[in-house]
Amino acid sequence: VASIRFDCRGHGDSEGAAPLGDETIDDDVRAAISALLSEVPTLDRIVLWGLCGGASVAALYAPHDPRVAGVVMLNPWVRTSQGVAKARLTHYYLPRLLDRGFWRRALCGKLALGQSTLDFARNVARALTPGGRPAAAGGDTPQTPAEGGPAAGAPALPQQMLSALVRSRVGALVVLSGADDLTANEFRQLRSDSPQWQAWLAQPHVEMAEVAGSNHTFARSDWRTQVEELSMRWVLALATR
């Protein structure tokens, strides 16, 4: 399968200034696709493959380029302040509250209960706030519109992504890390909370998979092998449709 990996402007080996504010890397994606098609003129369809913010960029870009036939999204970045708070409550705080070891450490004074209680209360408050403001991405996450601060009343990033995916009708493979990855857990929480996302994920051209126990970047060789095999199988199946 012919492929190209690229650094967007101002990152890695690429020159130029990194996108700022409301700018996106759509031009970078378009240029990379054109470069690949120029090198391999027999190609006529492209799959965008991205991790975290790269996955979100792929989803948002898909409806704007008819050359895109599918997207492979690893741990898609869908962060809002409410979403991350819910994920922390469900996947971090609740398991610890049910863990006997946690209470033993607490009773022995081995935990900073004051700070932990304050953090818990903050997450509860954010989880109960409808909508939730966009949350800033980490430094390794490519710029997307929501991270630059959308205009007042603009849809949150998860809604923008879903709208783009529905409009594009491209095939999609979603791959999630294990239960200890916050970004993967945010997507799980979004799936649990949103009937619209559930409906999209149930479409015949959408597939979901999980690499159990893996970290956010699938850093171990066996995790990478699983991701490679999932991606290859799905891309080859897409090519026959």
Image (cartoon, rainbow, N blue to C red):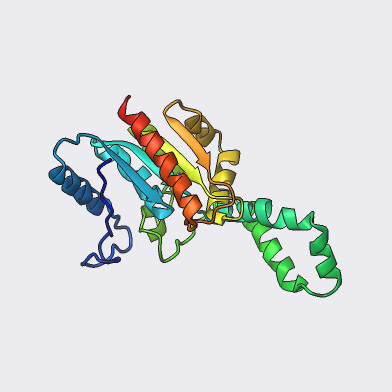
Q: For residue 150, what is the image quadrant? A: bottom left
Image side of residue 15 versus residue 78, left or right: left
Residue at image coords 44%, 53%: 52
Residue at image coords 47%, 57%: 217
Q: For residue 215, what is the image quadrant? A: bottom right
Q: Where is the N terminus found, in terms of image quarters?
A: top left
Q: Nearer the viewer, residue 129 or 62?
A: 62
Q: Nearer the viewer, residue 102 or 77?
A: 102
**Spot occupied by residue 127 in the image (x, y as percentages of width and height):** 63, 53
**Spot occupied by residue 78 in the image (x, y as percentages of width and height):** 48, 50
Image side of residue 125 versus residue 169, left or right: right
Against 63, residue 7 (above or below) is: below
Q: Where is the C terminus found, in terms of image quarters?
A: top left
Q: Is residue 156 visible?
A: no
Q: How many tags in the picture?
A: 0
**Spot occupied by residue 5 in the image (x, y as percentages of width and height):** 28, 53
Against 107, residue 234 (above or below) is: above
Image side of residue 183 versus residue 54, left or right: right
Residue at image coords 48%, 58%: 219
